[in-house]
Image (cartoon, helix red, strand yellow):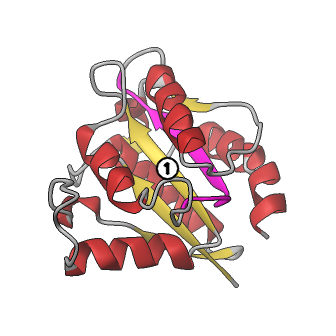
Amino acid sequence: MSELLIIPGSLRAASASRATARALAERLKDRATCTIADVGKLPHYNADVTDNAEVDAFIAQVAAARGVIFVTPEYNYSVPGVLKNAIDWASRPAFASVFKDKPCFVVSVSGGALGGVRAQAHLKYILGGMLAHVPAAKEVVIPLANNKVSDGMMTDEDTLAFALAEMTTFFDIFG
């Protein structure tokens, strides 16, 4: 069974992005071994730091994964700083990082009506800059996400069914 890394863009335990990550991991367990990354353990990015166990472990998780699913909220019309920080750690060396050619899929969540569409666009732009492989698919944006979470899990069946259906191309690539 393939390894799949899910990276939520929020540190808050009760966030809609973490709830969505947990629900996706549960739904995908027959298709892949899913690990949810804890990007909150990473220090602030600093190119002078070359030996950090948490950074090394995160980079190893990305490297070992056959594919990565990002579940990001939208903060101030973009991706959260903690998510960008994690990406920055794993993006080196430029154009030859563990993200090069890595199949990646983006899901965005928001308490607002747009579902984090701006964060999703920014994240796809960042992934393109690292030469990650983001397959063309309908965008999975989850508006009013906080209303679709119960007991720490995304529970909206229509939302989850749509997300899983749109991951078909992603799974065709990552196996």
| Magenta range | 99-111
* Residue where numbered disc 1 is placed: 70
Residue 38 drawn above or below residue 154? below
Judge from the rendering whether residue 78 lies leftward or rightward of residue 67; answer left or right. left
- Residue extending farthest top: 113
**Quarter of the figure with the C terminus:** bottom right
Residue 6 screen position, x and y as percent: 48, 61
Judge from the rendering whether residue 35 lies leftward or rightward of residue 99; answer left or right. left
Name the residue nearer the viewer: 163 or 127: 127
Residue 81 drawn above or below residue 49? above
Splitting the image into 4 quarters, where does residue 163 fall? top right
Name the residue nearer the viewer: 81 or 6: 81
**Quarter of the figure with the N terminus:** bottom right
Splitting the image into 4 quarters, where does residue 144 fall? top left
Judge from the rendering whether residue 130 lies leftward or rightward of residue 169; answer left or right. left
Q: Residue at x 33, y 79 (%)?
A: 57
Name the residue nearer the viewer: 1 or 124: 124
- Indicate whether residue 22 is drawn in magenta: no
Q: Residue at x 41, y 41 (%)?
A: 72
Residue 89 screen position, x and y as percent: 32, 59
Q: Amino acid at mark 1?
A: Phe
